[in-house]
Amino acid sequence: MINLLLLPILIPLVTAILLIFFKDRVFWQKALSLVAMLFQLVVSVLLVRRVYLEGIQTLNIGSWPAPFGITLVSDMLSALLVLTTSIVALACLIYSFYAIGKEREKFYYYSFFQFLLVGVNGAFTTGDIFNLFVFFEVMLMSSYVLLVLGGTKIQLRETIKYTLVNVISSALFVIAVAYLYAVTGTLNMAHLSIRIAELGQSSILTIIAVLFLIVFGLKGAIFPLYFWLPGSYYAPPTPVLALFGGLLTKVGVYSILRTFTLLFYHDTSYTHALLGWLSIATIVVGVIGAIAYRNLRQIVIYNIIVAVGVITFGISMMSPESLEGSIFYLLQDMVMKSVLFLLVGIVVYVTGTNDLNKFSGLIQSYPLLGWLFFSAALSLAGVPPFSGFIGKLLIVKASLTEGLLFEAIVVLLSSLLVLYSVMKIFMNGFWGEKKGYEPKTIGALYIPVVFLILLSVLYGVGIEFIRPFIVEATSVLVDPMLYIQAVLKE
């Protein structure tokens, strides 16, 4: 038992509290936030290394043994997600230094930035279904503040909608947990897996599984529960949008991945088939939105929905190959959505508009920006050898193995249409006659973008180095007993 897996939660929590006392000292807020994020990144790397060398790590809070106390669990999936969260958050933090503005910085922006990470890392690490709800709430409360901070009309309007939707989904979450506890008598996820297996095939468990799918689908933006996302994600400033786009929906997707492989895997003919069809519908809706809009933000926002559909479709098949593909794609999408929103933010900073019809010829003044965007577009669409390729390849191969030809065609077509949607920005915004903008100095805004683009390229090119980590993460999902034995020491 080690405390290393507690640090990704503890570091941002302590940092967030300390930042409250530096309300009017922006320089010290930035310095303390940067030091904390670098420390968290180092800890995350060490955690991945420890899990790879020694196996699943657990920590029983207060030394109460599982399943009686609160247990934190870090398997390879959890550790990789915490590491990716640290990378994305570091990039968004550096971008914030130059783009968020002193008005927001003096109203606890960096403090709530850190509180958001407490919720995200906690959700990835907890081994208790009720504490998953608790960390969800920490994440959501922080996101409410980050979304409304600045007080513009669109922010106020969308925050009301966003808050209302999440209050309802949180109420459903508590109800689902209560039903699950009433049936099984436990909240520890490893113990829940045993109890659910002992109960056998039960209609009440299928109903509870569908209820959890509704809860996590609402938070992860699965069809038809994605309706809140396009408006809510359009409202905040670029660094907040990049943070949301990279992390928030992925917590919902992770929750589906964890619960539908560890807990609700006994009635796959219904629950996972339902998830599969909803995933395909999610892909279709996301693609339609992405190709229909000529608004930069909306194009990328609808591509979030496409990615959620692709990942959850991989989960629905429950084969080792499809789960491996989902993990590959989940990790790369966290990085790519963040970098795309940062790139769009730079374009809007230069042109003053999200409307693709109002500017063109950016590559004449900003060649580096243009080719960075081009690289990000190829990676997002899954063009080899970029990072999005291997995940989609594995998911398509798995679907063909399962005889799901129609679904495989949908995933493949979605890649082409996603490429079209982002290349539309490149062709219309960067090529052509120079119009609609006056050259401005971008400077340090390039730093986090180049950092994430390089990582995405290395992720694709260095797949042989990365794959053993993904295979280990997949093995725990395929064989839940590995997770159960590590937590309950059986």
Image: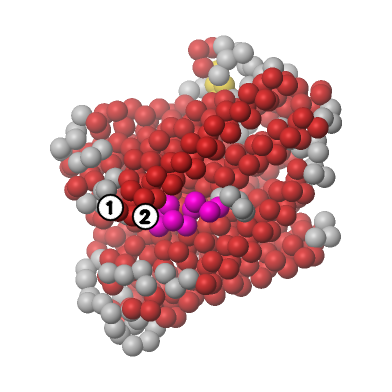
Report if the CB atoms under discs 2 and 1 are less than 8 Å apart: yes
Residue assigned mark 2? 235
Instruction: Identify the residue shown where x is 54% and y is 26%.
Output: 131
Q: Alpha-carbon neighbours of circle 2 within 10 Å: few (<14), some, or many (≥20)?
A: many
Instruction: Identify the residue shown where x is 46% and y is 52%.
Output: 245
Instruction: Identify the residue shown where x is 44% and y is 56%.
Output: 231
Q: Is residue 19 visible?
A: yes
Using residue 247 as the reference point, say whether residue 211 is left or right of it. Answer: right
Q: Is residue 489 visible?
A: no
Q: Is residue 216 magenta?
A: no
Three-letter amino acid code at the position of disc 1 = Thr
Residue 163 screen position, x and y as percent = 43, 41
In the rendered view of the protein, which quadrant contains the C terminus? top right
Three-letter amino acid code at the position of disc 2 = Ala
Residue 87 screen position, x and y as percent = 43, 47
Label 2 SS: loop
Q: Earlier in the sequence, mark 2 or mark 1?
A: 1
Above/below status of 225 relative to 171: below
Using residue 18 as the reference point, say whether residue 452 is left or right of it. Answer: right
In the image, 434 versus 384, the foreground residue is 434
> For residue 152, which numbered disc appears in the image?
1
Residue 157 screen position, x and y as percent = 36, 50
In the rendered view of the protein, which quadrant contains the N terminus? top right
Q: Alpha-carbon neighbours of circle 1 within 10 Å: few (<14), some, or many (≥20)?
A: few
Which region shows up in magenta? 226-236
Q: How many marks?
A: 2
Q: Is residue 227 magenta?
A: yes
State how far apart marks 2 and 1 are (Cα): 9 Å
In the image, 351 versus 229, the foreground residue is 229
Residue 324 screen position, x and y as percent = 68, 49
